[in-house]
């Protein structure tokens, strides 16, 4: 069933037919969690926190077992108050979701009519486009020369029907980032009717002074939404908690269409505890800061290209096109040794693999295996 097919009379179809465009969407492909024949593979395919989660968050989660029969607070009040206080934000401008994924979807639903479009970089995180296509909107991709967002390319891609621009900074799967001065330039040239979504899923890992997640700027802007997640730095990916800071009018629009109980009791409580656990956050950042340069340097030393510099908890590695040495060959080679990395075929990057920074033994195993692969 494709958009090219003759329009179907859905009312007279012999079976229910999804609306136009739905079956053309490529479903999200998660990082793999299994390797054939390997009992306990090492999962470096989903940019999770390799140190696990904050012990305080784990306690809060376990204590929530007593409340399994209770509906959660629909306003996510305890987390709303904690985030508002920590970042000095107005509580009513916060949006919560089942991961930041849901926030992107809600924004798409609130702003896109059929025929409208979103603009994003060519290697943008897949969830933006899935949500937009579900609204029968178009997805317009701007070139990312050198695997980096280019503001001029984004601006040249915006047109009359653009309603949202999605920018992950740093990006996934590229790991690269742009300075905040560039984000401000993008914003300055966007029509005020376009929502600029600054996805800060990996923002905590970026430590260059020229980086900024945009929260401060968003306070005074009427078309900027900044999103964050508890899935990466805080290690709560399984609990699905994301948040956004939006202008009041956008927060109010999203509030009308979200599911009433879109964050769980355990998720709310664990997120509050994780936010307060600065020791775990510092440990997680120190781990990434120690091993990211090491992996970059070692993999580079093998003769492979590491895209970057990465400002995230992963590295993007480029492979030759030579048969036997391709990214696909490397993915198989690593998988057979229990090292699960992320193939990027669905991102149109057949020559790259994305590798989450692991524990010391994982990182050493990856480098040893890649060296063996390239020599073989
Ligand atoms: C760039 C980016 N944004 C958002 C997310 C979504 O995170 P979550 O839905 O777990 O909050 C991810 C997850 O990998 C991501 O890579």
Image (cartoon, rainbow, N blue to C red):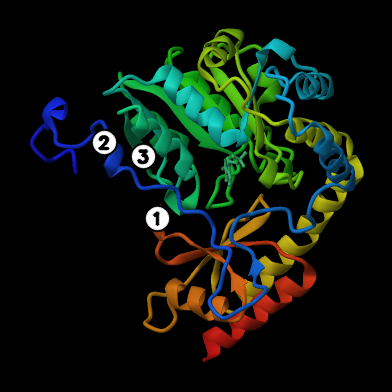
Mark sitting earlier along the chain (2/1): 2
Write down the quadrant of residue 258 in the picture. Answer: top right
The label number, if any, that marks residue 21 in the structure image: 2
Marks 2 and 1, how far apart at CA: 18 Å
Residue 231 visible in the shown view: no
Write down the quadrant of residue 273 in the picture. Answer: top right
The label number, if any, that marks residue 53 in the structure image: none
Residue 19 visible in the shown view: yes
Marks 3 and 1, how far apart at CA: 15 Å
Residue 121 image position (x, y, % from top left) = 43, 41
The label number, if any, that marks residue 346 in the structure image: 1
Q: Residues within 10 Å of mark 2 (few under 14, many from 20)?
A: some
Find out if the beta carbon at label 2 lies less than 8 Å from the nearest ligand 1 atom.
no
Within the displayed image, which quadrant is ligand 1 positioned in? top right
> Would residue 133 be found to the left or right of residue 268 on screen?
left
Q: Residues within 10 Å of mark 1 (few under 14, many from 20)?
A: few
Q: Pointer 2 and pointer 1: residues touching (CB < 8 Å)?
A: no
Residue 202 image position (x, y, % from top left) = 66, 43
Q: Is residue 44 above or below residue 285?
A: below
Residue at numbered disc 3: 141
Residue 254 image position (x, y, % from top left) = 54, 16
Where disc 2 sits, the SS reads loop
Mark sitting earlier along the chain (2/3): 2
Give the camera-side residue of 38 and 335. Answer: 38
> Would residue 195 be found to the left or right of residue 52 on screen?
left
Q: What residue lies at 34% left-to-right and 35% top-to-bottom? A: 139
Q: Is residue 30 above or below residue 268?
A: below
Residue 330 image position (x, y, % from top left) = 50, 77
């Amino acid at each position: 069933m494709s958009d090219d097919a003759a329009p179907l009379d859905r009312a007279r179809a012999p079976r229910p037919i999804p609306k136009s465009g739905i079956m053309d969407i490529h479903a999200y492909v998660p990082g793999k969690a299994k390797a054939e024949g390997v009992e306990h593979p090492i999962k470096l395919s989903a940019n999770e926190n390799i140190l696990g989660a904050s012990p305080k968050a784990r306690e809060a989660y376990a204590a929530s077992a007593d409340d399994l029969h209770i509906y959660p607070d629909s306003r996510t009040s305890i987390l709303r108050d904690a985030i508002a206080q920590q970042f000095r934000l107005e509580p009513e401008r916060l949006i919560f979701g089942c991961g930041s994924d849901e926030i992107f979807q809600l924004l798409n639903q609130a702003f896109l009519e059929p025929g409208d479009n979103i603009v994003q970089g060519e290697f943008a995180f897949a969830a933006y486009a899935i949500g937009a296509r579900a609204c029968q909107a178009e997805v317009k991709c701007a070139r990312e020369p050198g695997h980096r967002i280019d503001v001029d390319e984004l601006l040249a891609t915006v047109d009359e029907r653009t309603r949202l621009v999605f920018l992950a900074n740093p990006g996934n799967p590229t790991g690269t980032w742009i300075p905040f001065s560039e984000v401000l330039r993008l914003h300055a040239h966007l029509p005020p009717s376009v929502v600029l979504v600054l996805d800060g899923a990996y923002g905590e890992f970026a430590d260059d002074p020229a980086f900024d997640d945009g929260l401060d700027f968003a306070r005074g802007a009427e078309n900027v939404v900044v999103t964050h997640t508890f899935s990466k730095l805080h290690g709560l990916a399984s609990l699905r908690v994301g948040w956004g800071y939006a202008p009041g009018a956008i927060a109010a629009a999203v509030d009308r269409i979200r599911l009433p109980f879109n964050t769980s009791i355990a998720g709310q409580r664990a997120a509050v505890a994780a936010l307060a656990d600065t020791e775990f956050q510092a440990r997680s950042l120190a781990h990434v800061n120690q091993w990211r340069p090491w992996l970059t340097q070692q993999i580079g030393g093998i003769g492979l290209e590491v895209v970057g510099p990465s400002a995230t908890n992963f590295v993007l590695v480029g492979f030759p096109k030579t048969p036997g040495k391709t990214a696909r060959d490397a993915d198989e080679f690593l998988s057979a040794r229990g090292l699960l990395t992320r193939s990027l075929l669905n991102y149109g990057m057949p020559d790259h693999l994305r590798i989450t920074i692991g524990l010391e033994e994982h990182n050493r195993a990856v480098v040893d295996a890649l060296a063996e692969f390239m020599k073989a």
